[in-house]
Image (cartoon, grey):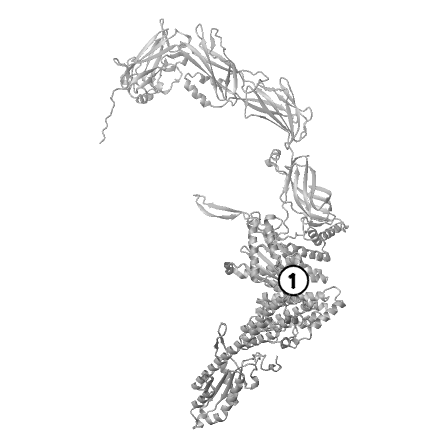
Amino acid sequence: MAVCVAVIAKENYPLYIRSTPTENELKFHYMVHTSLDVVDEKISAMGKALVDQRELYLGLLYPTEDYKVYGYVTNSKVKFVMVVDSSNTALRDNEIRSMFRKLHNSYTDVMCNPFYNPGDRIQSRFVCLGRAFDNMVTSMMIPVC
Amino acid sequence: MDASEEPLPPVIYTMENKPIVTCAGDQNLFTSVYPTLSQQLPREPMEWRRSYGRAPKMIHLESNFVQFKEELLPKEGNKALLTFPFLHIYWTECCDTEVYKATVKDDLTKWQNVLKAHSSVDWLIVIVENDAKKKNKTNILPRTSIVDKIRNDFCNKQSDRCVVLSDPLKDSSRTQESWNAFLTKLRTLLLMSFTKNLGKFEDDMRTLREKRTEPGWSFCEYFMVQEELAFVFEMLQQFEDALVQYDELDALFSQYVVNFGAGDGANWLTFFCQPVKSWNGLILRKPIDMEKRESIQRREATLLDLRSYLFSRQCTLLLFLQRPWEVAQRALELLHNCVQELKLLEVSVPPGALDCWVFLSCLEVLQRIEGCCDRAQIDSNIAHTVGLWSYATEKLKSLGYLCGLVSEKGPNSEDLNRTVDLLAGLGAERPETANTAQSPYKKLKEALSSVEAFEKHYLDLSHATIEMYTSIGRIRSAKFVGKDLAEFYMRKKAPQKAEIYLQGALKNYLAEGWALPITHTRKQLAECQKHLGQIENYLQSSSLLASDCHLTEEERKHFCQEILDFASQPSDSPGHKIVLPMHSFAQLRDLHFDPSNAVVHVGGVLSIEITMYSQMPVPVHVEQIVVNVHFSIEKNSYRKTAEWLTKHKTANGIINFPPETAAFPVSQNSLPALELHEMLERSPSDNSLNTTGIICRNVHMLLRRQESSSSLEMPSGLALEEGPHMLRCSLVTLEPGANKITFRTQAKEPGTYTLRQLCASVGSVWFVLPHIYPIVQYDVYSQEPQLHVEPLADSLLAGIPQKVKFTVTTGHYTIKNGDSLQLSNAEAMLILCPVESRAAVYSNTREQSSDAALRIQSSDKVTSISLPAAPAYHVIEFELEVLSLPSAPALGGESDMLGTPEPHRKHKDKQKTGHCMVTTDHKVSIDCPWSIYSTVIALTFSVPFRTTHALLSSGTRKYVQVCVENLSELDFQLSDSYLVDTGDSTDLQLVPLNTQSQQHIHSKQSLFFVWELKWTEEPPPSLHCRFSVGFSPASEEQLSISLKPYTYEFQVENFFTLYNVKAEISPPSGMEYCRTGSLCSLEVLITRLSDLLEVDKDEALTESDEHVTTKLMYEVVDNSSNWAVCGKSCGVISMPVAAQATHRVHMEVMPLFAGYLPLPDVRLFKYLPHHSAHSSQLDADSWIENDSLSVDKHGDEQPDSSSLKSRGSVHSVCSSEHKGLPMPRLQALPAGQVFNSSSGTQVLVIPSQDDHVLEVSVT
């Protein structure tokens, strides 16, 4: 499904970024980083009106030849960015939304963990902390078919 | 398909397309009304009700009127809609029945038959009436008749299919009316026809679509059908509907491709999978690309052809709809999509072909949009188009790389062949752009033609893209494109141009903390710097890269080696240093002092162990590691004294340094938390609240400029501090990971040393940690030798051995063997020399270093304590026992009050003095080996006991009582109490009444001792006694030395009893008991017990003949107000000084209470004549009584009832009266001389009968 999942702090540094191991990680880092431009643009374009509506899903940030980059922003301005292979046409908007929702829930769990220091990177080596989140991301990256 | 169905180009495919309406009948007539008709028809909109629940639309109708021909009628199965005649009109102006019957009817019938043959029901017969013609032919039938006939003949049930147009060319209201009716009819019928025919067409189309799963179904065929519908909508200016048709086709095709990818292939689709041979891009300048359309129709189109054609149509419609930005957006989607679809369908594409296609298409779309928008519009919608720009740039770049246009040497033959192939695939330029100078085709061709041209075009595009991204605030995207550009420059060997882009990008990534991009970009930058010869920058980047965990081991080693290689190069200028920040090379983790409190005395050795975590992948030989130390002297500061330092700096000596968080964006993370404090401001006058608020205490930290704090790249101008003080460690090999490095230093000057900078030098490369933070300091102190003597307990007790602690702080002095303390002995204080006493030697940090026996030698005057040898800055501690001898004289001050006769008063005094022990100070002067001056030490000892004495009498027998009170916290054992008369009287005997020889006295308790005085002859007037009692601490075992007893000396005077006073109260005569309120008689009997004694010889004595008398004053006082003394309560008597001389006094007293009442006191005083110069020692009451006596001194023995008056009045009169008059004096007799034999007796008083009952009636 997703080839890259990233959680980006309010200050735009990555809290978590993971891509399919088969591909060049660097490429996705650049891609996710560049997509923040559009995230910023969309957030500022949303303005106050949409904040009230609590629409967190930002939709397709931008497509590239090979990938589609989707965005989602929490109320605390933590951004989720998901890169999906363009050839994966089975993924519709609704699926992306639900994936983001799952991601958000997992992230909330991480935040609720008293041992997690908000603003720290989410690392899977801390068993109780990042592992569950990591597993969830892994499940999102495994192809369905 | 039917070949004859070739559409007629002039009629269709221009934007002038209009629905076709055929005209039959009178052509001349039609020609005459045509201008009006074509002008009037679109003037008013008509509501078009749609089938399938689609929203109704207002529509302006236009028509293309053509002459009726049978060929125009569509044959069965024809799907062409554009050429479909929606309405057939027959025009006639026949008004003559004859003519009608002769020609018109036949003509009409023939027309109708043709229509029926083609099952066309959309027709209309128009009869034009002309007044002029009517007038000419008078015999004509009424006009209605022709109309009726026609209706009758042709419109069986559809009378509305025949309309009359009256005088169409005239300008009259009737004409107008007639036109309106006709036009409405015409519009209605046209719409009816549209609804019916389009509905039928759509139904057919849907049927066709449903057959798509059938084997022979062709997408191209269906495409043509649905496009026909789109054309019609377009023709009707319903662009939205037309676009929907294309979007549906688009979606259908996409779905097929997706299904194909999923393995569900349709046969027809394989046709689209043919290899791509032409990649000439989108063509958007023509409304319809006939070439491509035909190829689709012929089922020869490739996927790119189909997509291109579809998009060109969508683009056209979107532009009609004024949505150029959607074109841009859709174009990007389309291009991505096409690339994906080709991949999905596994279409073979020559390398670079798609790049060409995409590049051309991007530029085509952009130019098309630019062509229909003005500059301002474009500028404000960059966000929509920038994606295309960026995409085109990217594609051109990859083409350049593909065709060898970026390499240094230029394209080789293989590259050239490839270029030729690519250009061939473009085909010839299309005529519509042939005259445009900047056409995408020309651009691409030129760009691929030469290295220089490519560079020009690529730079143009890149700069334009960067500029656009920057202008809309997409900085990250701009930096990313910039990085591509930098790569290009690097390939072109122009690192000076690449540097700025790499720096910009790196700064951006650093600011936002993206580790991988940072590493990658930094690597590029390092290469760039290497090419530019920026040695310092390159080494800095290298050190950062060598420590970068995101790089592979080999890469890290490479960069590390780069630094080492440079460092090992012989420097051209020897003194030149390359200063680099330390944090990338190694990190200071912790620092450990030994001694751990980081305090060392002068000359002491301090070692500092630091842990450096080397970030380098290989061991690095460091020539030296230097810590620059700042030295400061703080004089006169208590905080820097040796005592304070050794006591207070008790940290464990380990200082941890926070790990550097270089990978995180410092700007946000390192900001300290807000320190908010409540602030209340009160007015100074009345303390009421003026203002309240919250203040932030660390504003200066928070409101710093972001740039300065976030600049992670250390400024290259790192200052190397040079100072006289530095810690150095040479030739260290730093292994990867943690390394411990120990610095040793010998403390020289006292003061505070602050560690400032840490430098590690590798050849000419210096890694510098400019500030060591948190602040690390160590202190060096010097100390004078000192001696402290202090008691071990809170206070020292006199009389028993007490321990005293001696502390010698050696300071800078070294105690040698043979050094001793010389104590000059105080007289009353002994220094006890125990057999074995040991001294402990500690270092200044309180670690015990040794333990030595102490040799003490005492002589008469001097006690010498030889100290154990101890190095400088050590402490020697030992304990000695001292004994304060009780001082010989008694505690003189206390004997005054001891004579106080009344026991209760004595008790009071005791409490008053409380626990204050009497103290003695002993001064000892000690000569210390380090000083020529003696040290004088004062030791204060407290006497643990307080002793009081009392004289007790029983008639003439006398007793002495001694009370010993233990004031200390210790319990004592008292033994061997003695009372010795120190006077010279020989016949006095002191008989002890104490039974026990040993007694315990607990803390805060008292013990009493009693002796009886016995004498045989005349007793001496005064008695000097010394009380002594042995004591020792009760808890302790046998003491080594015998302790001196505790002594107390006192004196008792006038202890012999001279007078006996006896008082008696008897009830009134005839009564058995005394009653309250009734007068009783008091008889006082004063008896002299001895003959004239020495003590009687004073002024009161009068000698006449052999009769010796003395004057006494008696006084009856009842302090407890039990009695009222009636009459005179006092009087002066003349007492013969002879044994058994008795004086009797009678008085009336009245008991005031019932019960056993103690008798009133009777006091005796000596009455001294007035000429005595001494002032009286009497209390006020006696003085007053005395005054009153002086008025009538001889009426003493009569009870004077008048003196029963209030004493207050007498007092006031007398005190004023007798000022300065010579007055007789009263002197109290010493307690021992008067014995009150009736003291303590009581008289029973019974209450009087009912006298005082008050009757209270309550109403």
User: Is residue B284 toward the left or the right of residue B1002 in the image?
Assistant: right
The answer to whether one can see residue B844 in this image is yes
User: Is residue B1118 toward the left or the right of residue B263 in the image?
Assistant: left
The residue at 45%/17% (across/down) is B898
The answer to whether one can see residue B388 in this image is no
Q: Indicate the position of residue B742 as horizontal and vertical percent values.
A: 70, 40
Q: What is the secondary structure assignment of the residue under circle 1? A: helix
Q: Is residue B275 above or below residue B1120?
A: below
Residue where numbered disc 1 is placed: B481
User: Is residue B1063 toward the left or the right of residue B694 in the image?
Assistant: left
Circle 1 crowding by C-alpha within 10 Å: few under 14, some 14–19, many from 20: many
Front residue of B1049 and A2: A2
User: Is residue B588 toward the left or the right of residue B1025 in the image?
Assistant: right
The quadrant of the image that shows the C terminus of chain B is: top left
Q: Indicate the position of residue B581 as horizontal and vertical percent values.
A: 68, 49
Amino acid beneath label 1? Val
Front residue of B931 and B977: B977
Q: Indicate the position of residue B256 as horizontal and vertical percent values.
A: 61, 68
**Quarter of the figure with residue B514:** bottom right
Residue extending farthest top: B1106
